[in-house]
Amino acid sequence: VIDSSYANTQWAFQRFNIITRLNLIKAVITPLFNLLLVFLIHVYGLLVSPVIILLFSIIYYRIYAPKLNFAVTFDFRKCLFLFKIGIALQFFSFLFWASRGIDRTIIAMYFPAAQLGYYSFALGFINNIYKLISDFGNILNPAVLTELGKVNHALSIQKELNKLIVLM
């Protein structure tokens, strides 16, 4: 939660270089760190590695991200409004994560645990590549929407937007 709070705050302020640099570092060091810890402390390395990577991420944000000055306030009406919206978002988030985990669930039902481990390890590389590509889209999206807001008629730039969508 802490790591994603730091990341989401950086996305909100459009500090893309901080986030993408950390994602690139994590994409490189996570598999290497997993292998090292599995070699040193066996299967427990897979439990310890995410904690150490999380601590690394928090330290990275504390060093490289500008200091945030948030004041804690409470507004009951806004909380109620956000809670109503949040219920629907949580439901769809649950569906998304359930669909993301169904493959591992099926593998765990029909194959030995070692096969699930091999699959999950290989999937980690694919997820890191996907994350780098999705970071590009996350950076491009606010810029495109800002420019789209400046144009009176969105249809006038539809051809360029279609090319961009195909590229992504």
Image: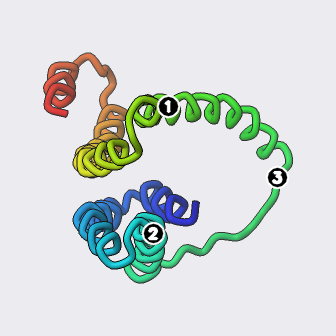
Q: Are marks 3 and 1 in contact (CB under 8 Å)?
A: no
Viewer-proximal residue among 117 and 63: 117
Residue farthest along the bottom direction in this orientation: 63
Secondary structure under the numbered disc 1 in the rendered image: helix
Question: What is the crowding at mark 2: few (fewer than 14 residues within 10 Å), some, or many (at least 20)?
Answer: few
Q: Which mark sits nearer the N-terminus, 3 or 1? A: 3
Q: Amino acid at mark 2?
A: Tyr
Q: Amino acid at mark 1?
A: Phe
Q: Which mark sits nearer the N-terminus, 3 or 2? A: 2
Secondary structure under the numbered disc 3 in the rendered image: loop
Residue at image position (41%, 83%) is 63
From the image, tell me which residue sits under label 3. 75
In the image, which disc is placed on residue 44? 2
Q: Are marks 3 and 2 in contact (CB under 8 Å)?
A: no
Q: Amino acid at mark 3?
A: Asp
Residue 48: image location, x then y, percent = 46, 71
From the image, tell me which residue sits under label 1. 96
Q: Quadrant of the C terminus?
A: top left
Q: Quadrant of residue 29?
A: bottom left
Viewer-proximal residue among 153 and 35: 35
In the image, which disc is placed on residue 24? none
